[in-house]
Image (spheres, grey):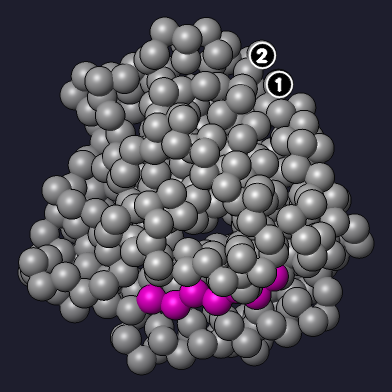
């Protein structure tokens, strides 16, 4: 898909990142006192919830939930959501619904992405979710997912660069957003695309080996092939060659690899979000996970047993992006479309202003 915007708009950059911990420095915004917001992101692998209230020019998270549900398991082969996957997911959404009720949420947006965009039985599934949990799921387009990713990452834009390339490696798809950065903290979305290449899709296509002998190069090749059309449309490579592009990754793959690079015994968002990973360090950490056994990946504090299957497919997609657009470093963003949803909602009601493009 292509989205040309000839009119750029200012992007609000609040003074600090929103966190999933209560931060006493963030005082509630009295202009929107009593309003509690919720953002639920149902992806191919994960069900994630943030509940927040306005805090000065940002928001303060007061509750959060995340569970691996593998909703998209088998979709690339069978074209529909399996009964087992739907049951797992409905159980997680039921917990989210309970949290929203208990926290007195006044406004919520609950979205579904990759797997629900492609499955043939999504309408039946979302009807079951509404009936069993009271949660209304909205299946959003890849373009809307990209817009929310821009909103979430807005604080991390480096305006010393003229352009930015954001990527979000999901379970079923990988989103790419090509942006122009201008003075006055203005952002123009030049182009977006949603590639049918996510960690679950690659894992199912190439098999989940129980050893370290994954067909890594084949996965990289698959991903690189899909990047070509986006490159041809936009000529990003030539701009990267002039060192004018900020590469920014918002996915779990990116944050996981950053945590491994830092040698963290357990994942710590505060140490990862916003860090710069040099190209040479990115190559080294990708090599290190290729050399890890399946057991070693599962035991790593930044990975865990449930996520171990997705590390190498995600690393392969990131390797393909790095090969195609060799930027000097990578900005790591531990913030996703939930953050973008909250900025939209709270900004509209008088709190933080959302990023727009």
Disc 1: which residue:
229
Is disc 1 surrounded by few (<14), some (14 to 19) or many (20+) residues within 10 Å? few
The residue located at (83%, 74%) in the rendering is 82
The residue located at (19%, 78%) in the rendering is 34
Residue 66 within the segment the image draws in magenta: yes
Give the structural element (helix, strand or loop) at label 2.
Answer: helix
x then y, percent, for residue 116: 71, 61
Disc 2: which residue:
232
316 with respect to 76 (left or right): left
**Residue 47 seen from this side:** no
Is disc 2 surrounded by few (<14), some (14 to 19) or many (20+) residues within 10 Å? few
The residue located at (81%, 45%) in the rendering is 215
The residue located at (58%, 83%) in the rendering is 92
Residue 199's place in the image compared with 4, above or below, is: below
Query: Looking at the rendering, which quadrant does residue 126 occupy?
Result: bottom right
Extent of the magenta region: 64-70
198 or 80: nearer the viewer: 198
x then y, percent, for residue 201: 77, 52
Q: Do the residues labelled 2 and 1 touch (CB within 8 Å)?
A: yes
Magenta-colored segment: predominant secondary structure: strand
x then y, percent, for residue 58: 19, 57
Tally of numbered tags:
2
Residue 271's place in the image compared with 308, above or below, is: above
Position of the C terminus, as image quadrant, is top left
Residue 228 within the segment the image draws in magenta: no
Residue placed farthest to the right in the image? 78
Give the structural element (helix, strand or loop) at label 1.
Answer: helix
């Amino acid at each position: 898909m292509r989205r040309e915007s000839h009119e750029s708009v200012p992007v609000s950059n609040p003074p600090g990142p929103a966190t999933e911990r209560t931060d006493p420095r963030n005082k509630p915004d009295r202009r929107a006192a009593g309003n509690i917001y919720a953002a639920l992101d149902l992806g191919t692998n994960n069900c994630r919830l943030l509940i927040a209230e306005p805090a000065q020019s940002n928001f303060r998270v007061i509750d959060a939930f995340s569970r691996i549900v593998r909703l998209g398991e088998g979709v690339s082969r069978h074209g529909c959501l399996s009964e087992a996957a739907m049951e797992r997911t409905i159980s997680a959404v039921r917990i989210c619904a309970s949290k929203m009720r208990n926290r007195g949420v006044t406004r919520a947006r609950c979205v579904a992405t990759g797997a629900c965009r492609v499955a043939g039985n999504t309408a039946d599934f979302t009807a079951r979710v509404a009936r069993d949990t009271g949660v209304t799921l909205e299946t959003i387009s890849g373009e809307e997912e990209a817009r929310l990713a821009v909103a979430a990452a807005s604080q991390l834009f480096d305006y010393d660069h003229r352009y930015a390339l954001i990527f979000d490696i999901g379970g079923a798809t990988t989103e790419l957003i090509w942006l122009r950065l201008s003075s006055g903290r203005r952002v123009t979305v030049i182009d977006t695309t949603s590639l049918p290449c996510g960690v679950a899709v690659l894992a199912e296509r190439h098999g989940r080996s129980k050893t370290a002998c994954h067909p890594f190069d084949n996965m990289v090749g698959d991903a690189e092939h899909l990047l070509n059309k986006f490159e041809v449309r936009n000529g990003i490579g030539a701009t990267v060659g002039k060192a004018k592009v900020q590469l920014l990754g918002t996915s779990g793959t990116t944050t996981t690899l950053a945590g491994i690079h830092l040698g963290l015994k357990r994942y710590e968002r505060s140490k990862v979000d916003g860090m710069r990973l040099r190209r040479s360090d990115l190559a080294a950490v990708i090599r290190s996970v290729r050399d890890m056994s399946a057991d070693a990946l599962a035991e790593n504090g930044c990975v865990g047993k449930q996520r171990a299957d997705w590390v190498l497919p995600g690393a392969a997609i990131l390797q393909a992006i790095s090969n195609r657009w060799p930027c000097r470093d990578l900005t790591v963003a531990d913030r996703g479309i939930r953050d973008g949803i909250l900025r939209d909602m709270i900004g509209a009601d008088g709190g933080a202003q959302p990023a727009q493009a």
